[in-house]
Amino acid sequence: MSLQDKAKAIAKNIEGKVQEAVGEITGDPQQKAEGKAKQVQAQAMNVVENAKDKVKNFIDKI
């Protein structure tokens, strides 16, 4: 996983956590849901990048 992609995923996760917390504090279910969605998106970004790393490592071993 490149450092840039990892940083993007971390930033997206933090953004989602903050947005979810704001939604919780203000009682705004839409904000809360959008925050959770961003956290899921960050997890997906990590999964994709980890898969890329595994494929690259496999190819390098060949």
Image: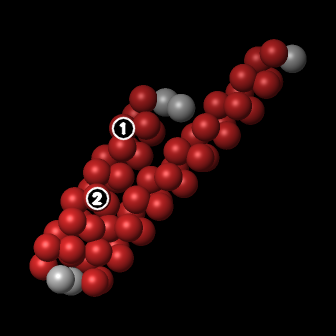
What element does badge 1 sit on? Answer: helix
Residue at the extreme right of the image, as rendered:
62
Q: Is residue 31 left or right of residue 51?
A: left
The type of residue carrying mark 1 is Ala
| Amino acid on which the number 2 mark rests in the picture | Lys
| Mark seen at residue 31 | none
User: In the image, is residue 20 above or below residue 58?
Assistant: below
Q: Position of residue 41 (x, y in %)?
A: 47, 60
Q: Distance between the residues labelled 1 and 2?
A: 15 Å
Determine whether 54 is above or below 26 in the image: above
Instruction: List the residue tagged with mark 1.
Output: 7
Q: What element carries label 2?
A: helix
Residue 31 locus on image (x, y percent): 26, 77
Here the colouring is secondary structure
* In the displayed structure image, the side of residue 46 where residue 34 appears, left or right: left
Q: Vertical placement of 60 versus 3: above or below?
A: above
* Side of 14 where 22 appears, left or right: left
Between 24 and 6, the one nearer to me in the picture: 24
Q: Quadrant of residue 4?
A: top left
Whether pointer 1 and pointer 2 mark residues with C-beta atoms closer than 8 Å, the reply is: no
User: Which residue is depicted at the point 31% across and 47% down?
Assistant: 11
Residue drawn at (58%, 40%), measured in percent from left and top?
49
Would you place residue 16 above or below residue 37 in this image?
A: above
Q: Give the residue at mark 2.
A: 17
Residue at coordinates 31% horizontally, 60% vertically from top-left?
Answer: 16
Q: In which quarter of the image is residue 62?
A: top right
Q: Which residue lies furthest to the left in this view?
A: 26
How many C-alpha atoms fall within 10 Å of the one at disc 2: few (<14), some, or many (≥20)? some
Q: Where is residue 54 in the image (x, y as percent from the top left)?
A: 70, 31
Percent from the top left, x then y, of residue 28? 21, 83
Decide which of tag 1 and tag 2 comes sooner along the chain: 1
What residue appears at the point 36 percent right and 38 percent down from the top-left corner? 7
